[in-house]
Image: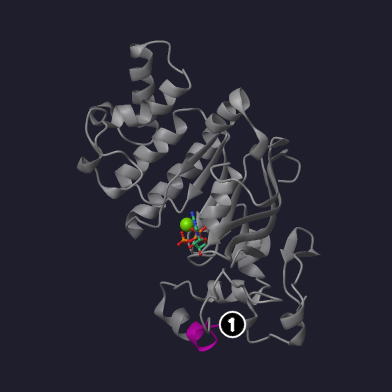
Amino acid sequence: MSEKPVVLEVSHLKKYFKAGANAVLKAVDDVTFNIHEGETLGLVGESGCGKTTCGRTCIALYDKTDGMVKYKGQDVHTLKGKELKAFRKDAQMIFQDPYASLNPRMTVADIIAEGIDIHGLAANHKERTEKVYHYLDLVGLNKEHANRFVHEFSGGQRQRIGIARALAVEPKFIMCDEPISALDVSIQAQIVNLLIRLQKDMGLTYLFVAHDLSMVKHISDRIAVMYLGVVAELTTSAELYDHPLHPYTQALLSAIPIPDPEIERKRSANRIKLEGDVPSPINPPAGCRFKGRCKYATELCDKQVPELKEVSPGHFVACHLY
Ligand SMILES: Nc1ncnc2c1ncn2[C@@H]1O[C@H](COP(=O)(O)OP(=O)(O)OP(=O)(O)O)[C@@H](O)[C@H]1O
Ligand SMILES: [Mg+2]
């Protein structure tokens, strides 16, 4: 992967929200990672840990509080005019909830063509229609679907429409924000396989957000595990599954059910349970943010924030155990 150029470079990114008169909510608090061309970086963590905020800040849908996001070398938060418009075309998003993210009053054709119109990608109406048919076909739908409304479709089909809408502006980078978590398990693999195929065919780069580790393995080259606004561990997906280092990653992995009762029974004996609650991002604990739920926590974890360190080639962990 490392030979491919870096597409997205995120360094020490922070995104805080105001929470009342004097409080700040530290949704993203010093996050650093790179994504290479054609790569998928999975971003995984429990609800509220800052995945969506991080992804949205990366594509400049949110201003940053501090740090830097560079897309192909350009600081995304300083883009204006034509450059910003070009970035808005290059960097697309696929949403978690295909029900809420598609306009119920627009036909499928108009939903898909909205970006084509904004960016002037079709010379005339005929070309616009041809493009709509092309993208419907690409995501496994067909031209009969073009003049219908989203309420006529199943969840999986709606997500296909959301994918077609993102693809229609010929993007290079897509932030996929839990695109399968609202779907039936039986449909999830189909959508993941579609995203993998499209990535290969079109040379796309993905940031793939998910809240558990079960499906991300198949799509991600590398995975960043987030906990309460920070990256706990970052490495290739094979390494993360085979040698998880951070106690939080180990807990997340042991929470994945294995569809074999025999293995499952043996496993549950030494399953690492997550104890306690996720602390509030409004007053995150000093030192290691995970310490309150970690059975290995020591005094050092109370005092000092663990830095994200490279402990073996390409394997980064933020934990005082290493
Ligand atoms: N626009 C906002 N204004 C204020 N607080 C926000 C805003 N967006 C998110 N937050 C807060 O920031 C924290 C991170 O939220 P975020 O949506 O990024 O988490 P997430 O990891 O995507 O969670 P989920 O898995 O539930 O989607 C949460 O505490 C959330 O309440
Ligand atoms: Mg989210």
Seen from the viewer's position, the closer of residues 68 and 269 is 68
Q: Amino acid at mark 1?
A: Arg
Left or right: 58 with respect to 140?
A: right
Q: Position of residue 208 (x, y in %)?
A: 53, 51
In the picture, residue 230 is in which quadrant? bottom right
In the picture provided, is 63 more to the left or to the right than 140?
Answer: right
Query: For residue 108, what is the image quadrant?
Result: top left
Position above or below: 119 against 11: above
The magenta stretch spans residue 294: no
Region rendered in magenta: 266-273
What residue is rendered at 47% in x and 79% in y? 263
- At a point 23% along the width and 28% down the height, the residue shown is 147
Q: Check the picture and name the quadrant holding the C terminus.
A: bottom right
- Residue 214 horizontal side relative to residue 76, left or right: left
Q: How is the image coloured?
A: one colour
Residue that appears at 62% across and 44% down: 39
Q: Is residue 207 visible to the viewer in this orientation of the structure?
A: no
Answer above or below: position of 157 versus 297: above
Q: Is residue 197 left or right of residue 282?
A: left
**Residue labelled with disc 1:** 293
- Which residue is outermost to the front? 21
| Label 1 crowd bin: few (<14), some (14–19), many (20+), radius 10 Å | some
Please state the horizontal and vertical placement of residue 245, each as a whole percent of the image.
Answer: 68, 73
- Check residue 269 for magenta coloring: yes
Q: Is residue 80 above or below residue 159?
A: above
Can I make out residue 75 in this image? Answer: yes
Front in this rendered view, residue 78 or 179: 78
Q: Position of residue 306 (x, y in %)?
A: 75, 72
Closer-to-camera residue (238/295): 295
| Vertical relation: 140 (above or below) 12 | above
Relative image position of residue 41 (x, y in whole percent):
60, 51
